[in-house]
Image (tube, rainbow, N blue to C red):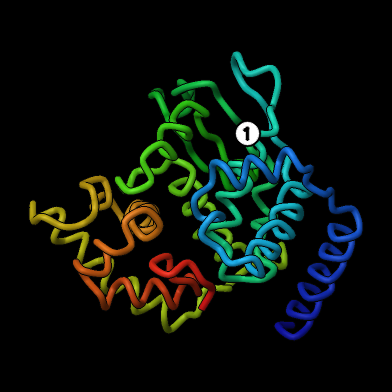
Amino acid sequence: MLLLHSLLLEIFEWLYDGVTYLNRRKITSSERTILENTFPYYQRLNQKHKNEFVKKLELVLTGKSFIGRSDIRVITPEMKVLIGATIVMVTFGWDDLRLPHFSKILIYPDSYYSTISKQYHRGEVNPRHGIIAMSWNCFLNGMENESDGVNLGIHEVAHALKLENQIYYNGESEFFNPEIYDDFKIMANEEIEKIKAGNLTVFRSSAGFNEDEFFAVALETFFEKPHKFFEYNPVLYGTLVRLMRQDPRVWIRQ
């Protein structure tokens, strides 16, 4: 049964990759200019990795639907490119990882009220409906300062990445190396206890809420404050480098 399940997943992934690749939409010269002018991660890549980044961005944009909410009537190329590029950045350590389960990206103009939680949100991930939602204003605010460790786009994509690793029917699951992931979780729980105890760490206080929030905040810190992260805890940082298969300190794939 397990062998059959594995075979079916491989067939699904092969078919999905083939259809997506054949129908991949090319990014335009103006969209590439957005990348070159406003996305620091892309700017720091060498030319070979820039080409890989663009190819993966095209596949991500092909497989996602971007939907405006509230007062957003038009989805601009900037919205698609920058949100898509954030997905590519977080998943860049894997050649073929695109988070297919999360096929819908909902974009709100600002913080929005949830009738489910009865509170305002800047962003959220809904695995049941395959949705990543975020405030465009908060997304841009997160990009303005690339070294403060606060980035809504990275935060929400991190939640989606962690969930995608657990979803077994879409051809993209268990891509985290289990041994490395176990090591990371042990150290993550140690950091959570430090935060709860009021100790000063490189992570902001919301990282102490639970393992999910720690992972999302850790990735924000990983991409925006890699050198400070490394200085604070080189072992935890190195474990995350191995888990994510890239090192933002040097901006190359490992």
232 lies above or below 242? above
Image spot of residue 233 (x, y percent): 22, 71
Indicate the quadrant containing the N terminus: top left, top right, bottom left or bottom right.
bottom right
Q: Is residue 192 left or right of residue 116?
A: left
Q: Is mark 1 on a helix, strand or loop?
A: helix
Residue at 42% x, 65% y is 248
How many marks can you see?
A: 1
Q: Nearest the camera: 222 or 100?
A: 222
Image spot of residue 43 (x, y percent): 54, 54
Residue at 47% x, 66% y is 251
Type of the residue with mark 1: Met
Residue occupied by mark 1? 79
Q: Is residue 204 left or right of residue 185?
A: left
Q: Nearest the camera: 166 or 34?
A: 34
Residue at 27% x, 51% y is 207
Residue at 40% x, 23% y is 118
Image spot of residue 46 (x, y percent): 58, 67
Q: In this view, does 189 lie to the left or right of 130?
A: left
Query: Is disc 1 surrounded by few (<14), some (14 to 19) or many (20+) residues within 10 Å?
Result: some
Q: Nearest the camera: 31 or 198?
A: 31
70 lies above or below 229? above
Q: Is residue 7 left or right of residue 40?
A: right
Q: Residue 77 appears in which quarter of the rendering?
A: top right
219 lies above or below 182? above
Image spot of residue 62 (x, y percent): 79, 48
